[in-house]
Image (cartoon, rainbow, N blue to C red):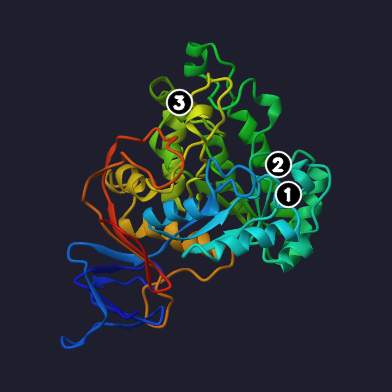
Amino acid sequence: MSLIIKNGRIMDPVTGRNEMADILITDGRIEKIGLPADISAERVIDAGGMIVAPGLMDAHVHFRDPGQTYKEDIFSGCRAAARGGFTRVLCMANTKPPVDTPETLRFCLERGRQTGIRMEQAACLTAGMRGKELTNMDELAAAGAAAFTDDGLPVMDEKLLLQAMRIAKRLDMTISLHEEDPLFIKAAGVNRGEVSRQLGYGGADAAAEDVMVARDCMLALHTGARVCIQHISSANSVEIVRTAKRLGADVHAEATPHHFTLTEKAVLFYGTNARMNPPLRTEKDRLAIIDGLCDGTIDMIVTDHAPHSREEKNKPLDQAPSGIIGLETSLALAIRSLVEPGYLTMMEVLRLMSTNPALLYRMEPASVRENAAADLVIFRQDEEWTADTFVSKAANSPFAGWKLPGRIHYTICGGNIVYEQI
């Protein structure tokens, strides 16, 4: 299908383009930017008042497929991603069975190819995510793994991790790490502090994250491995990553919208829908994460999209699973918490949500330029909408019912409209 996008403002962190221009898409690619008045196409989108940007990439999602598809599956997860403006996602490996063999990896990738967006798959770092022995990283890389991670669990054996980093360095691949030492966790999902004391709930101390981040930043420095610190939540950890980068470590970090929008007090209002690992922390931590996004210490915004059923989340706080969905509210929360207060520009947010994640995982970032794949999101930055329904199978979100800015009107992947706001 040929497609013209008219009257939109192109905003592209890759080229730096920030201007009004019409776009012609043919055969899945951007053929021409800046069109004569008499050109035609099979479909025309009037993007007046909207931003036309590269498709977003979420480098940290959980689609529960295989094994727990009552929560989410690859197809429903990718539909939720498309609604959120994402044209590429990276799925974590903590499925059932976990993605620790080429067979399971190929199963996921084949399903991903049927979804309409670009679905990448991480493989486990350790066999069965048990932390005892490494997977065959060479074999998994050859089968198409985009990264290695045991996300959901920390890698406690530093000797094993050192070996993994050396292999990943040779393969030129990223290791992404969930940083929570169980020694400092009395009860998961809630920060150990004012709110946990009020609830009589043991909580997870920030030290659980800090000690692991410090260890792994130094291992990255000494091996030269490319390492991503996942869903950073602690002010101290942000400072540790900042120091490691200054020392020359190839260390990167993620931040989630919930960690830069909410604090531990959200647990008092939203209950288990504000329970997550690592937990929401203090206002000091929230502001430190925003500082890290502003100065480049934190490289990307991810959702850690973690769907659970209503029945599971309705259990008591100490029994409910941790995690929230995030794909459909991520861009809106970045606008609300980062752009509107003046911390970041819209262009900077797009870099954090599109360009940087792709570059970290050695993928070509989406771009609004001629001959590039037509992977685009079209949204109206100042248009409010209510997060009252979700395309995801799950609805476990503290942001359900919030009025948010940044309504997405179209997501286009490979020249095909994969989401259209009706």
Q: Which residue is mark 2?
A: 215
Tell me if 102 is positioned left or right of 387 in this view: right
Counting from the top left corner in percent of width and height, residue 137 is at 77, 59
Task: Say what amino acid the circle numbered 1 marks.
Answer: Leu
Label number found at residue 219: 1
Counting from the top left corner in percent of width and height, residue 327 is at 43, 48
- Mark 1 vs mark 3, foreground winner is 3
63 relative to 313, above or below = below
Figure disc tally? 3
Q: Residue at the location (36% across, 36% down)?
A: 399
Furthest toward the front, the residue is 70
- Whether label 2 touches label 3, CB < 8 Å: no
Q: Residues within 10 Å of mark 1 (few under 14, many from 20)?
A: many
383 relative to 179, above or below = below
Q: Is residue 281 visible?
A: no
Dot 1 lies on which element? helix
Nearest the viewer among 31 and 394 is 394
Q: Residues within 10 Å of mark 2 (few under 14, many from 20)?
A: few
Spatial CA distance of label 1 from label 3 is 31 Å
Task: Say what amino acid the circle numbered 2 marks.
Answer: Arg
Tell me if 111 is positioned left or right of 194 in this view: right
Label number found at residue 264: 3
- Whether label 2 touches label 1, CB < 8 Å: yes
Dot 2 lies on which element? helix
Residue 139: which quarter of the image? bottom right
Spatial CA distance of label 2 from label 1 is 6 Å
Tell me if 243 is positioned left or right of 343 in this view: right
Task: Say what amino acid the circle numbered 3 marks.
Answer: Glu
Mark 2 / mark 3, whichever is N-terminal: 2
Tell me if 175 is positioned left or right of 419 in this view: right
